[in-house]
Amino acid sequence: MPTLNHSWVAGVAVMPSVIVAQDAAYPNQLKLATLGMFPVGVTHEAGIYAPIPDIGTNYAAQAGNACRVYGPGEECQVKTSSTLAIVNGDMVAPDANSFAQPAVHGFPILGYALGPSVAGERTRVRIVDHEICDRSQTTLVKTADYTLKLEDLGKVISSVGAVGTVTIALPVALVGYEISARVGAVQELRLDPNGSETISTGTGVPGTAGQYATANAVGETATFRCEVAGHWSIVAQSGTWTVA
């Protein structure tokens, strides 16, 4: 039996095996959790009636009704993002649909994956209480062009060993996303925004759409953060970074 709280009430109709958060306005009421919220747990896998097409959606609880929840310290199955796979042992967090996705540096997590899961399936997790994803002590070495994944955010991208220009393609910039970079070879290290998004160096002046930030001297570093959706800013740097 779930042990987190036996008096949760669903503030909205919730599906089985999705991630939920506490509604700040109503202490015992749940809402669907999305990235940036502290999850309280995962709804029970059982529905309130059989998932028969003629009956309708198989909810875990209807709005205003009691809702069974798996909470901190427990293990359960949770629906996985329709587009992002999960790696065994990694931190997971809610996506925009309250499904599990790889956690993002600096944001609250649901817990830790107890096995791998392909996109659109389910993953087993061990739920934790109020933890933040921190990958700032992790170095990711790339000597060839690479597209960053959500689980790479927060890490230090290093180009040690590169024999040519290395271009790091950044994900869509959402507020709170952060990445660091360190030039590890006498070659250009470029951080390239997604599509028509922009990036600015220490001057604070944004480049034009599609321009990248670059540096090429060993030891030059920069931390890029999204503080306005669609734009990356250098919030700390050493050496010379330019936009081209």
Image: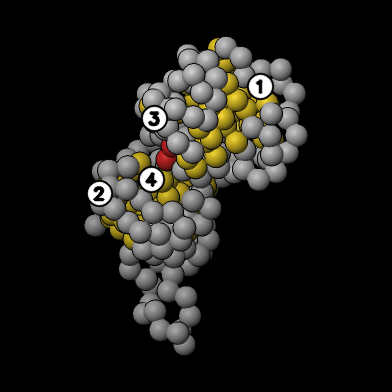
Q: Of 17 and 170, which appears nearest the observer?
A: 170
- Point out the frontmost of discs 4 and 3: 3
Residue 60 left/right relative to 210:
left
Identify which residue is drawn at 40% across, 59% down.
119
Q: Quadrant of residue 134?
A: top left
The answer to whether one can see residue 116 in this image is yes
Is the C terminus in the top left, top right, bottom left or bottom right quadrant? Answer: top right
Give the mark nearer the N terminus: 1 vs 2: 2
Q: Could you say which disc has been placed on residue 141 in the image?
A: 3
- Residue 226 percent across, percent down from the top left: 61, 32
Give the mark nearer the N terminus: 2 vs 3: 2
Please state which amino acid type lies under the numbered disc 2: Leu
Q: CA distance from mark 4 to mark 3?
A: 23 Å
Please state which amino acid type lies under the numbered disc 1: Thr
Residue 131 left/right relative to 24:
left
List the residue tagged with mark 4. Answer: 92
Which secondary structure lies at badge 3?
strand
Q: Quadrant of residue 2?
A: bottom left
Please state which amino acid type lies under the numbered disc 3: Val
- Residue 132 percent across, percent down from the top left: 41, 33
List the residue tagged with mark 2. Answer: 114
- Residue 178 percent across, percent down from the top left: 53, 31
Which secondary structure lies at badge 2?
loop
- Point out the frontmost of discs 1 and 2: 1
Give the mark nearer the N terminus: 3 vs 1: 3
Q: Could you say which disc has been placed on residue 242 in the image?
A: 1
Give the mark nearer the N terminus: 4 vs 2: 4
- Residue 115 percent across, percent down from the top left: 25, 52
